[in-house]
Image (spheres, rainbow, N blue to C red):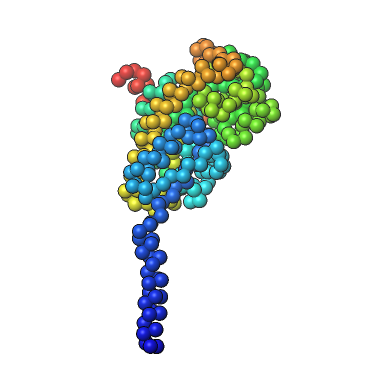
Amino acid sequence: MTLLRRSLVAAAAAAALLAPLAAVAQDIKPRLIRFGYGLNEQSNQGRAVKIFAEQVEKASGGKMRVRAIGAAALGPDVQMQQALIGGAQEMMVGSTATLVGISKEMALWDTPFLFNNAKEADTILDGPIGQKVMDKLPEKGLVGLVYWENGFRNLTNSKRPVNKLEDLDGIKLRVMQNNVYLDSFKTLGANAVPLPFSELFSALETKTVDGQENPVNTILSSKFFEVQKYLSVTNHVYSPWIVMVSKKWWDGLSKDEQKILLDAARASRDFERKDTREEAARALADLKAKGMQVNELPAAEAARMRDKLTKVNASIGASVGMDLWNETQAALAKLRGGK
């Protein structure tokens, strides 16, 4: 009986050890991907992250799942970038402008009046120049997948319409935490104040700043119309977003997993740009209906601003490298020449 009892105990112990392993084999947990973004779930950013998540889950057969975390719940762009570099967060989408302190080549996209239209932006961003800028990220601990569209940036404020260069004088304007934006708006006469986007609505509401600059989609989705009276359509900068992953995390993925993420990122990019452009057309009408006073900056005044910013552009060229700057200008000239 003693031998039999020992055998039974041994068998039970073996079964107890094997049971969890069998359960794991049957129910392997999906790879969870935390994807942080700054805007709310109802924004163009939120909609595109949802498309990305659906594509990843479908292509991986549920083995990879994206947890979308919006409204800057994981912190502003700069904080999320550091979390990616440290491997504490897997993915994010944010402004290229907030990356300039990490990768100086990103300042290329901050050049005032660089692109005349969305087609020019798509061609440059998705081509060899855009890739060349993204290829500088891995050495900093980040991997860029695709560029999304934030859109052409416009000015809002609570003081007066901006119809000419001089109207910017003394306006306390929130800008991104980026030296090109600071230098540009100081040069144009504004009192430029760097602030994280997550603090912006409150700063406008309390009159800590008079105004800000963002694409019309963001002005609408962030409800800036509640605290801003004037919207001046200046299209002064084309602003891209960039979808990035942590290099530490990326390097631990299989080639198949990396391909699933890259394919999903490209699908989300195509959706996001179409969605953003359609929304932008509606957003301007919506902002007018919500009581904002809208004016368009005359072409002659835009030209005056561009001329005023010659030194800023020269400094951008020096910062990103003259080879990259000249290559970009040559590519744009070719596009505009219809060649």
> In front: 227, or 327?
227
Which quadrant, please, contains the N terminus?
Answer: bottom left
The picture places residue 65, in percent across and down from the top left corner, at: 41, 46
The image shows residue 173, relative to residue 136, as above or below, that is above
Identified at 47% across, 26% down, the residue is: 151
> In front: 178, or 40?
40
Identified at 62% across, 24% down, the residue is: 226
The image shows residue 205, relative to residue 292, as above or below, that is below
The picture places residue 319, in percent across and down from the top left corner, at: 49, 34
The picture places residue 275, in percent across and down from the top left corner, at: 42, 27
Which quadrant, please, contains the C terminus?
Answer: top left
How many numbered marks are there?
A: 0
Residue 298 makes an appearance in the image? yes
Identified at 37% across, 69% down, the residue is: 18
Query: Is 167 left, or right, of 297 in this rendering?
Result: right
The picture places residue 3, in percent across and down from the top left corner, at: 37, 87
Identified at 51% across, 16% down, the residue is: 285
